[in-house]
Amino acid sequence: MIDVKLLREKPDIFYTSCRNRGIGTEILDTFFMLDEEWRANQKKINDLRHRRNEITHEISRLVKEDKNSTGIRGLKSDVKEVNARIDSLEEDNRKIVDDRERAIWSIPNVLDENAPVCFGDENNVPVRTWGKASVFDDDLDDFMKESRREMDYETLKARPVSHVDLIEDMGLVDLARAGKIAGSRFYFLKNRLLKLEMALMNYTVDYLSERGFSVVEPPLMLNLKSMEGATDLETFSETLYKIEGEDLYLISTSEHPIASMLSGEFLDESELPIRVAGMSVCFRREAGSHGKDTKGIFRVHQFNKIEQFVFCKPEDSGDFLKEILENAEQIYRNLGIPYRVVNVCSGELGRLASIKYDIEAWFPSQGKFREVVSASNDTDYQARSLAIKYRASGGNEFVHTLNSTAIASTRTLVAIMENFQEDGGKRIRVPAPLVPYAGFETIEGVD
C-alpha cells in the first residue's frame, strides 16, 4: 500500500510513476475524486454537528428558562432532521471510504529512480555478465547481442542436448506417470537428480546461514488477509491455487508467508535488519503460460525454492538490495553457471516492486538467457499493507522489505544439466561445491 499522505502532498510523483509503468493514471484520478467527495461530505457532517450542538444548547436554555414547549418541540424536530442528514452523509462516506480504499490498494509503488522506463522483457537493461558461455554456432549472433559482446564464450559445432532429452534418456524424471496422476507440468524427480536437488538446497541453506540469515520452513498455505497484504493478488490470481471451501491459498513463494509473519507488529530498531531465508515447496498454476515450456521441468506447477527476505530501516534498503542480489550471484558463480544480470523494465514490474533485478542463466541448448532469480526492493509498500512498523528515535516508521530468489530448484537443475553435460550428453558433471553434499561427482545413465 502506498503512503496516502505523500500521495496528497506530492501527487505528481505518483502520476509520473504510473505513466512510466504504462498503466495510465485513471486510478489516481479516481482516488482524488473520491477523496474530494469524502472531504466535502465530512465538512458537511462537521457543520451539521456544529448546528446540532447549537440547537441542543438552545433547547437546554429554553428548558432552564421554562419557555413554552412549542418552541422546544420545533427545535427537537430540527435535531432529528439534522441527525437524519448526518446519518445519510455518514453512510455515503462509508461507501466512499470503501471505494477509496480499493483505489489506494490498486495504486502501485513509486518507481525507483534507477528503474529503467521501458516495456517488454526483451527491453530489460543488461547490467553485467559473468562466466564463459558455451554457444552453438547458429546462436552466436543472438548471444553477442544479448551479452553486449562483454561475455567470454566458446563456440560449439553441435547443439548441446536439451534437458528434456537428458532427463528421459538418463531416467532422471518421470513426466508421463506424473501426468497420469496429476496432469501436465508435474513430475517425479528420481535417483541422482533428486539427490542433486537436495544437495543444491542444503548447500544454499549453509551459504545463507553463514551470512546471517535465519532459515525457516513456512506454512505452505496463507489466508486471504495475509495473501492480500503480502502480494498483488490481482496479478497473482492466475498463479495461485485456492483451497476449495477454505480461506486458504497454496503459497507460490515463501516470500509471502515470511512477509506476513510480522504483520501487525512493532519492532524495536535494535532488531533490524532481520534476514530470513525461507525454504519451501512452491505451487503455481501457470495459467498465463499456455504453450510456454510445455516439456521438461523448466516451468512447472510445483518446485522447491529458497527465498531471501529482509526487513530493514528505510535508509538501508538500497544496500540490502545489493546484498541479496550479490548473494544470489555468488551462488551461481560458485556453481559455475554463466549468467547475466538485467534491470527489469518499469512496465514489467509488479505493483509492489520499486525496482527489480533478474539473474538470467545461459541455457546452451536453447541458445538463450532465461530468468532464474528475481531480486526486488518493495520499499515500505508491502510493510504498509501488512502494518509492520518499528520504533525509531523520531517516532514509529514502516520498515522496508526486500526479497530475492536464492535458488529455484528445477530451473537451476536444468541450468546445471545444460551447462555441465559431457560426452554428447551421456554424462552430467556435478558442480564442485555440491559434490560433498551429493556424495558423487557425475550422473551417468540410469543412476
Image: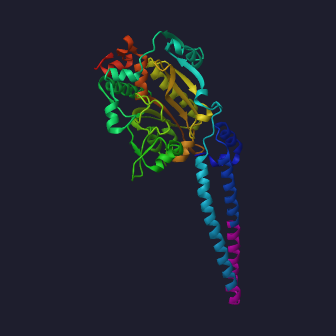
443 over 317 or under it: above or below: above
Please report the residue visible at 49 percent of the width from the left and 35 percent of the height from the top: 289
The residue nearer to you, when weighing 166 against 212, is: 166
11 over 301 or under it: above or below: below
Left or right, 424 with reference to 7: left
Q: Is residue 294 magenta?
A: no
Instruction: Identify the image quadrant of residue 144.
Output: top right
Please report the residue visible at 43 percent of the width from the left and 15 percent of the height from the top: 160
Instruction: Identify the image quadrant of residue 379.
Output: top right
The residue nearer to you, when weighing 36 against 53, is: 36
Magenta segment boundaries in residue numbering: 45-72
Q: Is residue 63 magenta?
A: yes
Left or right, 400 with reference to 12: left
How many discs appear? 0
Left or right, 237 with reference to 165: right
Query: Which is the main secondary structure of the residues drawn in magenta?
Result: helix
The residue nearer to you, when weighing 99 against 50, is: 99
Q: Position of residue 311 (x, y in %)?
A: 50, 38
Q: Position of residue 413 (x, y in %)?
A: 40, 24
Q: Where is residue 36 in the image (x, y as percent from the top left)?
A: 70, 56
442 over 398 or under it: above or below: above
